[in-house]
Every structure is written in C-alpha cells, then in structure tokens.
Amino acid sequence: MMDARKADFGLTGLAVMGQNLVLNISGRGFTVAVHNRTTEKTMNFVRERCAGRGIIPAVTTREFVRSIKRPRRIMLMVKAGQAVDEAIDKILPHADRGDVLIDGGNSFYRDTDRRQSFLKSRGIGYLGCGVSGGEFGALHGPSIMPGGDRADYEKAKDVLLKAAAVTEDGPCCTYLGTKSAGHFVKMVHNGIEYAIMQAIAETYDIMKTGLGMPVADIQETFERWNSGLLNSYLMEISALVTKKIDPETGKALVELIVDSAAQKGTGKWTSQTALDLGIPVPVITAAVDARIISGHRAERAKAASLVKPRAGRIRGAARSRMIDRLENSMYALDLIAYAQGMHLLGRASVEYGYGINMAEVARIWKGGCIVRSRILNVLKDVYRRTPKIVHPALDRGFTRLLSPLVNDLRATVLAASGAGIPVLCLGSALSYIDSFVRSRGPANLIQALRDHFGAHTFERTDRSGVFHVDWS
C-alpha cells in the first residue's frame, strides 16, 4: 500500500550516487520519495540504509510521482542517454503542469536543450543539473550546477542549496543560466578534470621512469605538493592511491593496475564542442587522446616489440631540482587547463545565450567537486575584477602567476622528451602558451598555401583588403 505521507522531493535512480544524494537531502530535513527501475533495489536501499529517515519508497512510477507534494521536484539520477528519455516518458503521464524534473546525470547539453523544449510545451520544467563530487560528495555535499528557466530553479533551489557543499564563500550551488548552461558547465568541468589527471599521471611517470623513484617517494612528493600551491582534491587522492599497499603481494596497488584508462565521453564532448565554437582546448584534447592511446594495449605491445621504446632515465639534473621543476610544471598546467576551460565557457555563454557568471562558476567549484583547487580562488578574482574578460591570460594577476613557471615547464618537457617519456598534456600546455603569447606566428605560410591550391585569398600586413595571386 502506498504511504499516505507526501514527500518534499523525489529521486529516481538508486545507484550509489542516487542513494547518497537521497541520504544527503533527507539529512537536511526533507522527506524524499524514492524509486528505481527495479523494485528490489528500492526496498533493499530503504531497509538497509534509511532507518529513521524521512524516506518514502514507491514501487510504480505512478505511486512515486503521486507521493510528492506539488509543484513536484523530481531528480533523475539515471545513466545519460536513452535512459533519461525513458525515465521522462514514464513520469510524464503522471506529472502536472508546474512540476520540475531535474536531470542530475552527465547528459550531453544538446539533449538537455531538446528535453527542455519538449517538456516546456507540456508545462513542465526541466533543469539540466551537473553534480560533481563522486560518492563522497553526493553524501556529504557536492558541487551542484543547475541551468534552465530561472523560475524552475526557484522551485528547486531550497533543496539544491542545502544539499550542496559549503565553503567560506557560501553553498557550492548557484543558478548558472538559461537552457543547458548547467550541463555545459559540468561538461567543461569534466574536460578540465581529464587534463589534470593526465598531467598528474605524466609527472608520476617522469618520477618513476625518468628519475627512478620508488612509489613510496612519489607518494610523499604528492602529499607535500598537496600542502602547497598544488592543493586540490585530485592531488590529495593521488597521494592516497599511491599509498595503498596490496595485501597479497606487498606492492603498491597502483603498480598492479592495468595501464588502460576508461572514459564516459564528457572529455570528448568538451573537445568536439570547443572545435565547433573555435576555441582551442589542446590540453583537454591531449588528455582524451592519451586515454584513447592507453586503450590500444595490444597494438602498443606489438609496436613496443618492433620499435624498441626509448623510455629511460633523465640525465644531467639533480633529483631535487627536477622535482621542484615538476611541481612548477604541474602548477602551470593547472592554470592553463582551467584557463582553456573558462575560455570555452565564456564563448559558449555568448554563443548560446546562457548568461553564465564566470566568477560564480569558479566559486561553486571550490567545494565538493572533483576539480576543487586553490587555483579557483585565482580564477574567481580574475572574473570579479573583469567579468567580461575573454581569457584569464589577459589578466595581469593571472599572468604574473603563470609567467615565472613557463621555463620550468619547458625544462620538464625537454627532459622528458630526451628520455623518451611521453608528455602529451604537459607538452601541449607548453606549446599552447608559446602560441598564445606570440603576436605573430607561422599561419601566414598556411594561408599562402591555401591561396595557391584553392584560391582562398589572404590579407596583407602592409595594406588593407583581401588578395589573391597567381603563385605559379
């Protein structure tokens, strides 16, 4: 029999993230209706984790929807893609005008635009809502990134604000803008996450392969870095995972893991969208490429037997000096990765009419989420000083931090390259900043070639106008 109580909020999709969000929200004083595609999971969750909490389980979708107070706020925590559309189709016959659906998954922003348009025609609101923080963040407070109609956000914000992580700057949740702004911001967040993880892996490889450091020493280095300029969640957990010892072998567990990294598509979406908008994000693209290369294990093994890899020790540099250079290189990479992501966000905000407050993006990423870092204080200050700035590197305060680091980044890339250690992300960051700070590059030759074979025309530096010549 259906519970006679009415819930303040509903959530369907009880995988680990969904379960932890339910416990988080109910712990803030809200009664939550819960539902899952399989009834067994719903009942097991309520029985095993919800004792004494304001949780209302529902077997059918109709029971679930009808157990929530109007206007209903219903969060979908299901796999991105077709599963979201299926969940909407099941809820829709039982929903009423004025209800709001909140997609808390990693949906592609174009899908969010489509769903918002469809549901709006039915009088139902739809928020694309990025949620970052993993299992721990979902339970204790994630960074929450909602976008859609402002009126729909107003209906749901009491729950979202209380469920979010809190820093000295307030709750890590804010209204980000119209349409798919929330899911777009989360997509770029994930792209930055890809870049930073790849760069950490490259520094690990340099220390292990190039400097011959045991994992215990690398772990201590990561731990020390996390207490300084590189303080961030990703550096913190890098120190944690390199510390874990496998009880069966006595070896560092990280050394026993197959070197093939999976992905769910958000990094690829970031790179593809950046190309569409004409914004360069090469460190993110390099990180995606690195993951793809890692997946070609059979091909790599065969190529290694044919080509004979050169990876070896870095010569001619004291270990302590090289580690200091690596620390500065990581900090430069972090600054560049965030700058590229923010450059893309700013362009998308204009192109798609999102109206994103860039300082607020940096603020809500400071707590709960995977890319939380001390660097976000730098970015927040950049955008508070100049809200419409196109790129953080155009801010004097930002460049004062980045400029002294570039020589160490260059030395790191040269040393790694000389030892045959691949640094797709660190190398890309160096080439990006070298390109970005040049007032004149070599693209004039490319334009001459284009005009030769395709009559694409060109402009001149010494006079105005558009020109084409017979090069032969």
Image (spheres, helix red, strand yellow):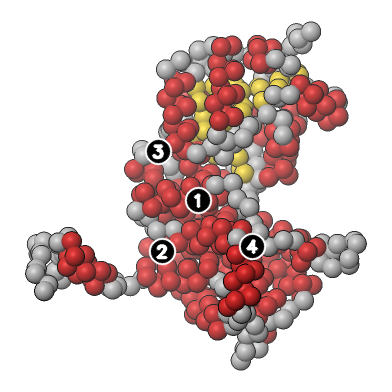
| Residue drawn 53% across the image and 68% down it | 424
- Residue assigned mark 3: 354
Mark closest to the chain's N terminus, 3 or 4: 4
On the image, numbered disc 2 is attached to which residue? 393
Q: Nearer the viewer, mark 3 or mark 1?
A: 1
To which residue does mark 1 refer? 268
Amino acid type at circle 3 is: Tyr
Q: Identify residue for label 4.
A: 297
The quarter of the displayed image where residue 258 is located: bottom right
Marks 3 and 1 sit apart, C-alpha to C-alpha, by 21 Å
Which type of secondary structure does the marked residue at label 4 adopt? helix
| Coordinates of residue 197 in the picture (x, y in percent) | 61, 60
Q: CA distance from mark 4 to mark 1?
A: 20 Å
Q: Residue furthest right?
A: 248
Instruction: Tell me how far mark 3 sits from mark 4, CA to CA.
Output: 41 Å
Q: Are marks 3 and 4 in contact (CB under 8 Å)?
A: no
Q: Earlier in the sequence, mark 2 or mark 1?
A: 1
Q: Quadrant of residue 418?
A: bottom right
